[in-house]
Image: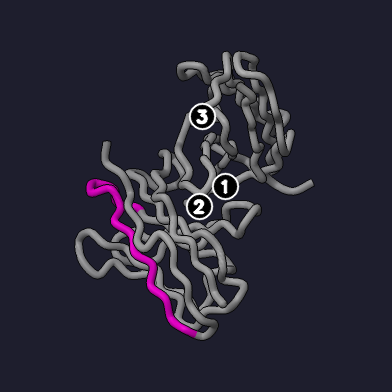
Amino acid sequence: EPEVTQTPSHQVTQMGQEVILRCVPISNHLYFYWYRQILGQKVEFLVSFYNNEISEKSEIFDDQFSVERPDGSNFTLKIRSTKLEDSAMYFCASSEVNRGGSPLHFGNGTRLTVT
Amino acid sequence: SQQGEEDPQALSIQEGENATMNCSYKTSINNLQWYRQNSGRGLVHLILIRSNEREKHSGRLRVTLDTSKKSSSLLITASRAADTASYFCAYPNFGNEKLTFGTGTRLTIIP
């Protein structure tokens, strides 16, 4: 069964550094998402992406965050200047349909630790 | 109470028993979904129930949806040790693409 893959599985970075989290969504999916989960807390929506542009974003997704689909397969989340509070699990997801009308397929996440 | 609240927060049962988890929400929805998360892993979609459905089954899973009470329940019958995980409800707000996730129920099946 096709799956969403994320790399790296664990990233440690110093405060103020830039990080790029990478994802390969399922190949025939058209909608891509990033969510994050701070340890022991709720899964929070960050951003959705369709047709090479952001279609929706949350208040968390400020100017420090950006997303890109540099080629036909990768989908990346960049944090320009990491803060301690950015430490979390970051999950990429993809779906065939938008408007929450179809299930999301999640990757196994990248654990980001900012020191 | 918060949107997407689930109860109980944690549940421990003996293998073979049934487990019931509940989810409440506040907005209008066109569907509600349930996901499972094993420790340190991504979320796995279990089942989606549409707003015009009252009950849906998938294997040992049974989901109900009561839009008048803005609540849903997930029943896992004949539980197994492998069912140990956190379970989340999630729903899209009308017109939005994002899913709002509940707080989750941590289920432990005791062999």
Q: Nearest the camera: B72 or B108? A: B108
Q: Disc 3 versus disc 1: distance between alpha carbons?
A: 13 Å
Q: Report x, y in % for residue A87.
A: 56, 68
Where are the magenta residues, as a range?
A17-31
Q: Which residue of the protein is positioned furthest toward the left in this rendering?
A: A72
- Vertical position of residue A2 compared to residue A113: above or below: above
Q: Mark 3 lies on which chain?
A: B
Report the residue marked by disc 2. Answer: B98
Does the residue at mark 2 contact the one at mark 3 (Cβ under 8 Å)? Answer: no
Based on the displayed image, in which of its 4 quarters is residue B55 positioned? top right
Does the residue at mark 1 contact the one at mark 2 (Cβ under 8 Å)? Answer: yes
Q: What residue type is labelled 3?
A: Arg
Report the residue marked by disc 1. Answer: B93
Q: Report x, y in % for residue A111.
A: 48, 61
Q: What residue type is labelled 1?
A: Asn
Report the residue marked by disc 3. Answer: B50
* Observer able to see residue A108: yes
Q: Mark 2 lies on which chain?
A: B
Q: Nearest the camera: B30 or A30? A: A30
